[in-house]
Image (tube, rainbow, N blue to C red):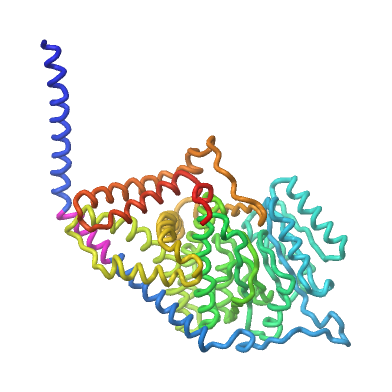
Amino acid sequence: MERLSSTIILPEAFQGTRDGITRHFGFIWDQIKAPLIVPLLRFAVILCLIMSVMLFIERVYMGVVIVLVKLFVKRPEKRYKWEPIKEDLEFGNSAYPMVLVQIPMFNEREVYQLSIGAACGLSWPTDRIIIQVLDDSTDKTIKDLVQHECQRWARKGINVKYEVRDNRNGYKAGALKEGMKRSYVKNCDYVAIFDADFQPEPDFLWRTVPYLALNPEIGLVQARWNFVNSDECMMTRMQEMSLDYHFTVEQEVGSSTYAFFGFNGTAGVWRISAINEAGGWKDRTTVEDMDLAVRASLKGWKFLYLSNLKVKNELPSTLKAYRYQQHRWSCGPANLFRKMIMEIIRNKKVSLWKKVHVIYSFFFVRKIVAHIVTFVFYCVVLPMTILIPEVQVPKWGAVYIPAIVTFLNAVGTPRSLHLLFFWVLFENVMSLHRTKATFIGLLEAGKRVNEWVVTEKLGTKAAAPKASKKSLFKFGERLHPLELGFGAFLFFCGCYDFTFGKSHCFIYLFLQSITFFIVGFAYVGTIVPNS
């Protein structure tokens, strides 16, 4: 009987102990909430609202300018001198500028034939063009395949140079810099650069080189990207929405109003003298293309963006590849901003207005504020206000500004407007990685500040890999603890909001948490079907 009673008393004792612990933590929470947590959260709300307003003004400004550009600004061929380059009967092909085409590669088994074939298929006098394949491959089999492909085109009469080096110092920037040192490059006037998955149309040089040949102030002509696998999966559709805004609005506005924008690293033609005057390629950050563009702009060179000239390329179709790409694209600009801000301020060749544009709009708002406010405000601060009702967020900051900014971001891809809500969720999830990378770049913290991982490419005819049960829960490759942690945090906030009815946003928080879980557990491209 005593044994039976003890079995009844023990659960009650455990329950009492648990209640005591709960009351103890509740007491501690009440003691620190009013003097510490609430003021900090209010300060975070104010700071996030300021950043939201900055981003809102930037997006509205860009939207207004792009409308004015489309209505009133002349097309590039009318703003600048442009006419087809004609053969001179007296001098023959020597009337054509000498063009170098660079194709940097690293273990590109799936796409090397496509890129080399597209470059060798460019319509230009064969004695006035040099195709330079810069192969940094570490796989001997792939190196042999690339070299054999170059030899095959050489036998057809194409001037193809297969270049290798003993190391990968500087990664892509190092390869491009090494390629420019070759003796035959001294005879070239312009250099066209294509990453390994880019496939220019045969008339690419005919449509770009005349701008450089007839306008000595232009240092760069940039073409638009055209994504061949945008319909492969939901993740590629999300990427298309983000990049289309960049090419439809940001690049167009920069070209039309400031004659400056960030070089996209590929699908562009540089004046070689502009590269040399700017100091050549540098490998101090992971965005060597942006680095060169800023330095060339500070030397007074103008840039031209051609929105009607599109070059086919491939979007990352696995989350692992996309994560690495976004880390490089977020960390690099922040690190470059840290390194160049004083150089930009002290520069005397460009106007004050252009300096303000580069420092505030190009770098600070787009490359830093946009990432930080997306994650900190929408994934941390707003859910925290559900748990702490003493802190209120004005409706204009929590609803109106985000909605307007979201719709302005979506104007570049009208065919995907029905996916806008999913795009918001996915961008919020990716903002976790972008924010982390931004702080790594700003603070130059850790080894990842200069991490360069080549984006995996599958080729235009390749399908996304299917998930295998064996590797579905491989930690660090498909299971990401940060995403799962924030998914659990948002799920808890949604449950709390639903239980106590604080702000009635539990549906969004539940969907947000589910998105975090999905992205954390598996590749989006292998789970979310094509829509």
55 within the magenta span: no
Q: Is residue 467 above or below residue 206?
A: above
38 within the magenta span: yes
Give percent across and percent down for residue 420: 43, 63
Give percent across and percent down for residue 280: 64, 69
Q: Is residue 48 above or below residue 84?
A: above
Residue span colored magenta: 34-46
User: For this view, does 237 lie left or right of residue 86?
Assistant: left
Residue 180 falls in image quadrant: bottom right
Between 288 and 146, the one lying in front of the other is: 146
Between 49 and 457, the one lying in front of the other is: 457
Q: How many marks on residues?
A: 0
Characterize the magenta stretch by its predominant secondary structure. helix
Between 78 and 160, the one lying in front of the other is: 78
Determine if residue 60 is in view.
yes
The single residue placed furthest to the top in the displayed view is: 1
Give percent across and percent down for residue 323: 50, 53
Q: Residue drawn 85% across and 61% down?
A: 154
Q: Residue drawn 73% across and 65% down?
A: 181
Determine if residue 435 is in view.
no
Residue 17 falls in image quadrant: top left
User: For this view, does 257 lie left or right of residue 511?
Assistant: right
Give percent across and percent down for residue 8: 14, 20
